[in-house]
Amino acid sequence: MDMYQNKTDIKYHVLRAAINLFGKAPRQLEPAQLDKVRSQAIEECALEQLVLDSVEARDVHIPESVLADAVRQVVNNYPDRESYLNDLEDNGLSEAQFQQAIERELRVNTVLDRISSRAARVSEIDCMLFYYMHKAKFDQPETRTARHILITINEEFAENTREVVLDRMAAIRKRVTAKPKRFTEQAMKHSECPTAMQGGLLGKIPRGQLYPELDTMLFSMREGEISTVVESELGLHILYCEIVHPSGPVPFKEAEPRIREQLTKRRMRMCQKSWLSELKQSAQQGDNAHE
């Protein structure tokens, strides 16, 4: 362990492992936790060096602007620059050393991205096979596309007393019940919810997502129906059940983009894992040849 203690890369990996594993700085860890962190840091550092020594890493260069942006993102997590520098000092790192460690990490990530790009493309057949072999994963509960109009109650303001709001909501409900197509326009004009900008659109809602009073009402409605006035802790609402989406399997075409993304990420990970395994094996064979 001592041979690594003064190395910048190990200090950085110890700091990162401590935060990732325990959400603490190394100095805050118990001895057993610190041992685990140091062990992981040494493994990560050795793997990082293997990647950077590879043929694929020889022409990798991180532009100064990209490095500066990465460092800036870290600094922005601190209340001020002084706190950032103090934290580096507490963990045995200078600002230059920390930036060097970030630059190494960016180079490693760039190499791994290049390796993952070698992964075979996911075809439609691949997606279909996954879909039909995992049908249970694509069962969806009943959902409803809904809109609402909200007006809050505040007895301190004459225009928002309960009596006035009830009268306003009754008038609005009368208009939208007669012509449901006006719901979007009426929501934009009268609703006090941020969704007013989208015509009161709440989206595709499953059971249990809304306030209990609204949830009970929405899932008792027919498609195209306008609710009575419903009260929640936010105020008074009128709901519009625009579309009822029955429970059942998600159609393949709807599921395909998500499947393709999942399979692509899996193949990229496998490609990286296989390449890293080859690097380790080559390094081990080299070590054995020198014994």
Image (cartoon, grey):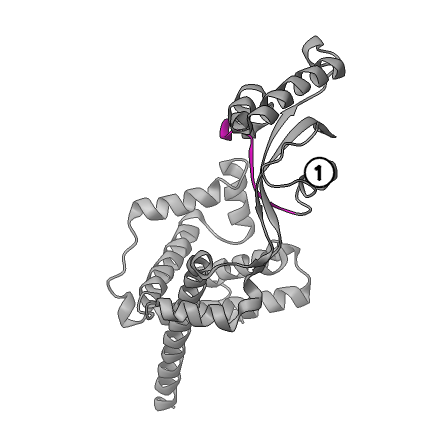
Q: State the extent of the magenta-drawn residues as a range.
A: 197-206
* Few, some or many residues within 10 Å of mark 1 (<14, 14–19, 20+): some
Q: Secondary structure at mark 1?
A: helix
Q: Which x, y percent locates residue 273? A: 42, 73
Q: Residue at x 56, y 65 (%)?
A: 137
Q: Is residue 114 placed above or below 19 in the rendered structure?
A: below
Question: Magenta-highlighted stretch: main secondary structure?
Answer: strand
Q: Is residue 124 placed above or below 247 in the rendered structure?
A: below
Left or right of 115 in this view: 206: right
Q: Nearer the viewer, residue 37 or 248?
A: 248
Task: Decide if residue 3 is in sight here.
Answer: no
Under mark 1, the amino acid is: Met
Give the image quarter of residue 195: top right
To which residue does mark 1 refer?
217
Q: Which x, y percent locates residue 112? A: 36, 65
Q: Is residue 178 placed above or below 243 in the rendered structure?
A: above
Q: Nearer the viewer, residue 140 or 27?
A: 140
Q: Which x, y percent locates residue 99? A: 40, 50
Of the 4 image quadrants, the one containing the N terminus is bottom right
| Magenta region includes residue 202 | yes
Q: Residue at x 33, y 47 (%)?
A: 66
Q: Is residue 100 placed above or below 262 in the rendered structure?
A: above
